[in-house]
Image: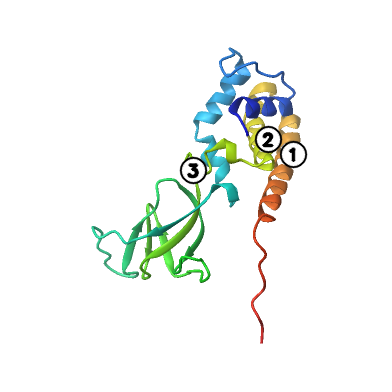
Amino acid sequence: MTAKLALYNGALRLCGERRLASLTENREPRRYLDEVWADDFVKGILEKGMWKFALRSTKLDPDSNVTVEFGHTHAFAKPDDMVRIAAVSSDEFFNTPLLAYNEEQSWLFSSTNPLYLRYVSSDTNYGADMSRWTKAFSDFAEADLALAIIKRLTQDKSEWDRLAKLHRSILTSARSLDAMADPTKFLPRGD
């Protein structure tokens, strides 16, 4: 289980700073971390992958209060907790990917009814539930926090460059490990 204090301390370790004893400790690094956290940090890191622990599936029915004037015949309200789309389908098993849809602001438009949507969720029972985070994702979150505050802590560009390189490596590794959790998929039969 990941805790906010553990993430903060992991980020500070990457920055070469001493640990925090608590989330109320009156130190400049903690205030920097709080600023980054308050700026929709969790949603920002969830946007950077198709994290399995944050995936949610739902059936969407068209909004009867919206009249579509042209193009697709139905408008579907996007879920409030949607960070990014993982799959859209016309069947509940997501066997047939749906490519004929448009995404505009807070709406999805399609001629299919109903619409099945799998997405990365920032809901407190999905992506924002830190107890569900994998070790690799937590490591990525620490690196992302560290990268966000290192310039303010050290004013050293070479330290930022070092952390940026490490951040990319950790993100790549976290995405790869997450992708390996997918069930086995086979290529379609050819001619």
Is 123 situated above or below 2?
A: below
- At mark 3, the secondary structure is loop
Please give the name of the residue rendered at 64% of the width and 29% of the height, measured from the top-left corner: 7
Q: Are marks 3 and 2 in contact (CB under 8 Å)?
A: no
Q: Residues within 10 Å of mark 1 (few under 14, many from 20)?
A: some
Residue on which disc 2 sits: 143
Q: Are marks 2 and 1 in contact (CB under 8 Å)?
A: yes
Point out residue 158 in the picture as x, y percentages from the top left corner: 76, 31
Please give the name of the residue rendered at 61% of the width and 40% of the height, measured from the top-left corner: 133
Left or right: 44, with 8 as reference point: left
Which numbered disc covers residue 122?
A: 3
Amino acid type, mark 2? Ala
What is the total number of numbered labels drawn onto the structure image? Answer: 3
Q: Nearer the viewer, residue 126 or 85?
A: 126
Left or right: 129, with 101 as reference point: right
Q: Residues within 10 Å of mark 2 (few under 14, many from 20)?
A: many
Residue on which disc 1 sits: 166
Residue 51 at least partly seen: no
Point out residue 59 in the picture as x, y percentages from the top left corner: 40, 59
Q: Nearer the viewer, residue 145 or 185?
A: 185
Residue 178 at least partly seen: yes
- At mark 2, the secondary structure is helix
